[in-house]
Amino acid sequence: MHSWLTRCSIGLTTIAVTGASLLIPAPAQAAGTDIVVSRPATSAAPAATAEATTTAPVSREVEVEQTPVRTAPQEGDDAASKRTAVDPFRMAGVTWDAGSGATDVSVRVQVRTNGTWSDWQALSIEDSNEGGRPGTAPLWTEAAADGIAVEVKAGSGTPTGIKVTTIDPGKPEVVTPVSPAVFNTSEGEPDEGMTEEIAADGTPKVVPMPSIITRAQWKAGAGTSCSAPVTRPKALGVTIHHTAGSNTYTKAESAGLVRSYQTYHVKGRGWCDIGYSFLVDRFGQIFEGRKGGITKQVRGAHSGVEAVNQYATGISMMGHFDYVQPSAALKTAVVKLVGWRVKFFGAKAKGTFSAGGKTYQVIHGHRDVKSTACPGKYGYAWLGAVGGLRDRVGAYVSKATSAAGAPSAAPAPKPVTLSPPTGVKVTASTTSASITWNKVKGASGYRVMASPTGSSAGAKYVNVTSNRATISGLHARRTYAFRVSVYQPSTKKRVSAYTSKPFATARTKAFVAPTGVRVTVRTKTGLRFLWNRSAGAPGYKVQVTELGKKPRNRYYVASVHGITVRKLKKDTQYRVRVSVAYPTTKERVSAYSRAPHVVGRTLKATPKAVAPKPAPKPAPKPASAKNVVTPSAGKVTFKGHGYGHGIGMSQYGAEGGARAGQKYDAILRKYYPGTKLSSKSASIRVQISADTTNSVSVKPRSGLKFRTLSNGAVITLPSSVSKRKVATWSIDLAKSDKKKNSLSYQSGSSWYTYSTFAGDAQFEGPPTISLVMPSGSTRAYRGALRSTRPTATSRDTVNVLSLEDYLRGVVAREMPASWSMEALKAQSVAARTFGARYLGSSKHYDICDTVSCQVYGGYADETQRTNDAINGTKGKILTYQGAPALTQFSSSSGGHTNQGSTPYLKPVSDPWDGWSGNKNHAWTQTVTTAAIQRKYAVGTLKSISITKRNGLGDQGGRVVSMTLKGSKGSRTITGVDARWAFGLKSDWFGF
């Protein structure tokens, strides 16, 4: 996809461009200077041209959605939307209310293409003197996208009314332009000294109007009424732009690109029409821009200076010419268009004109008017080069006495209209709804809207070809109106009105209250709670109540099915209740978990080392299980073993071995046979994924230092600067030059630049450094906090520290600190080895801090016992053939480990896993047949048969394949498929 970071801004008041400086307009030449005067009569009156095929403001070919984005309540906070499914689109932009008072606004977006979410991409901000809504330059995707997330921030104030506009330009098609009359294009032989390109342009007596794709042909909308002055007597000059967009679009996509520009300018920015007078693509096609402007000087919105907008024709070359040269076809088309334009209005190709108190060359670039990179370094160089645009236009019109008029209007096609559907019926679940309606004769498709307001505000859409549809992604416990229209898939436009009032309505259901709430970790001042994941839940709201004479409630929001609560009182009981909720709004959409409620007690003091425990009692043997089951009362009961993939070390098995008197090295030999203990010391780079901003912001403290990595220079950061007390230090992208970075500090509510530098840099010095997270909270880390640049326009936060210090933030997250010391030591070696395996990555970090790699929480998650275990195995890792081993581990093996991908990840019998404290060794779980039928479309489920196992352990081991038999057929799946589809603890089960 393409992010227009240095786009040629339409109507831009100010623009920051890398490496650009303010270019002074060229001084007036001795001859050819023009000023604002009435246009003289032309030799032939031009004919009127067709404006559009519709009276709607934007093209009926496009589909446009505007999705509100939540505004944070505090000044300076950000606004954000969750990842949201929308109708397919190729262009997107973000706008907000004018007059909101927000300054230094920055916007980032993510889009989903082919099921994959992109990285965050920054959009440049476009100012305008056209009025309307402030907003960004739009983003054009290289392929259709169907999901978007938005983040908006402001240096001060709060943007209000934030909306993201997504646009589907319609079906790609090659448009044949209107062909004007043929004129004699040359007069005698070419002059001596002409270049081949200039000679090829010809020297006509009457400059012909080039072939132009009219608004009717590219299916423009009518726009809205533009404020006065709409036109001027004549065009005094031409401003050359580039769109700074894609350089790889196809010829069939060009018309859609132009439609998208117009749609975003009208619907997103609130302008009266597209800002340019003409657009020229890389194939040499010329598109009519703002309506009425082919043979008139219509005021545009392209230069950022009102006088230039009024008296200069805005022509935009479609592409990004900072990166590539304009094509030969594009150059020739621009020469013919500019030549016809200047001759039509009596201007001189190499003359000058005055407007707004300044003098400009007749043919000039946007950067001659405003401080901008537009029209790109290659585009701008071509304007004044020998044999460039000015030379070619001057030669082209040198023998002409007049210019030809406009083409005849193309007749507008008559729209096909059908009656709207009737009989709309709806059945709703928690976050989706099924809709049916009566078929409409002659309809080839339908478009369905689900809206909480009955209008397009907040609506979701789906297009189908039958008279039934399902809309997903709805908000739970909310009433929606459902409306249906007839839709033409081939043209991507509606051919009927939506169903009218009274609308069919339905209320989505609440989620079922979460179950399985439990306490998993206890410390002196904290408790960790887990609960069963609720399918489809957007997040959770957790109520924690301090029990005592005066119970006190605390509330937390979690996006996953677990939470660690800190800053609690020692030796105190806390009750927990959990509900399904939306994290951004904290709105509950289920009841709280039912009684009896879980109660956890914080510890009295730091646990001391425990004496060796007697051999653990074995867990009760599970009831025998079968390989075939027939559903009973709409349910299937699974009986299984273990939790997780079962490869490598079982964490419960390690604890069982330690309770049986085994040392950590014996535990590791059992689970990783063939490996040996070795030593390793190194530093490691950890990506801090929760810091999603481009900034690395930390709190000041004694000894805090700043290091630039390019030259190794180190400075100690002061607590105050110029008598301003520092509240926060931050490394950011430099605003003035995006190739550089800045060290800034916050004092009060204002930010000040301390220095600028090139390359990566980091904060270091104190034993711990407090990182400011996007939410405003802080989290402490050992070592250094580095700001590194993965791309040219973004920065990432990386914690650089010793491998031993890294372990301190890992082991406490992976295993309960109250477990036996030898089990904690085994976990320490496994985790250290896992980290060592990733050292020396070619990326800007070695390892991430999530479950995708190994969970790491920094200094805040350390405990004394896990630190003791780390110190007791200092530097120890497992190696195989001299390299760090792949030390995979899971919660519980169930009594036999699974086959892994390496020679030392062998399946072994694991009786240690079966001690009485392991509730995951053997388990029973009930799943409804409805849940199974939803996942696999076999009709009414008749039976489930296990057809193959891996032969390792009780019941014949883990399930390799199984068959679901139903009224509509059968489906064979793997045990791993069943585990994830039905929410089972492992793929080792029977019935």
Image: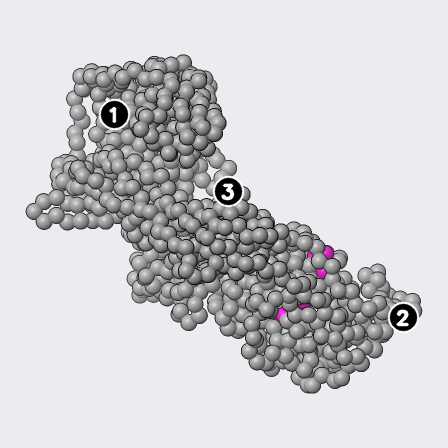
Query: Where's residue 34, x and y in %?
Result: 70, 82
Q: Mark 1 points at which residue?
A: 919
Q: Residue at x 43, y 22 (%)?
A: 962
| Mark before the other along the chain sequence, 3 or 1 | 3
Dot 3 falls on a residue whose secondary structure is loop
| Mark before the other along the chain sequence, 1 or 2 | 2
Three-letter residue code for mark 1: Lys
Left or right relative to 639: residue 503: right
Q: Residues within 10 Å of mark 2 (few under 14, many from 20)?
A: few
Frontmost of labels 3 and 2 is 3
Q: In which quarter of the image is the C terminus?
A: top left
Three-letter residue code for mark 3: Gly
Q: Give the range drawn in magenta.
A: 282-290
Say if 618 sits above or below 277 in the image.
Answer: above
Say if 884 sits above or below 183 in the image.
Answer: above
Q: How far apart are marks 3 and 2 (CA)?
A: 59 Å
Q: Is residue 46 inside the magenta stretch?
A: no
Q: How many marks?
A: 3
Q: Is residue 287 inside the magenta stretch?
A: yes
Q: Can residue 295 be seen in this view?
A: yes
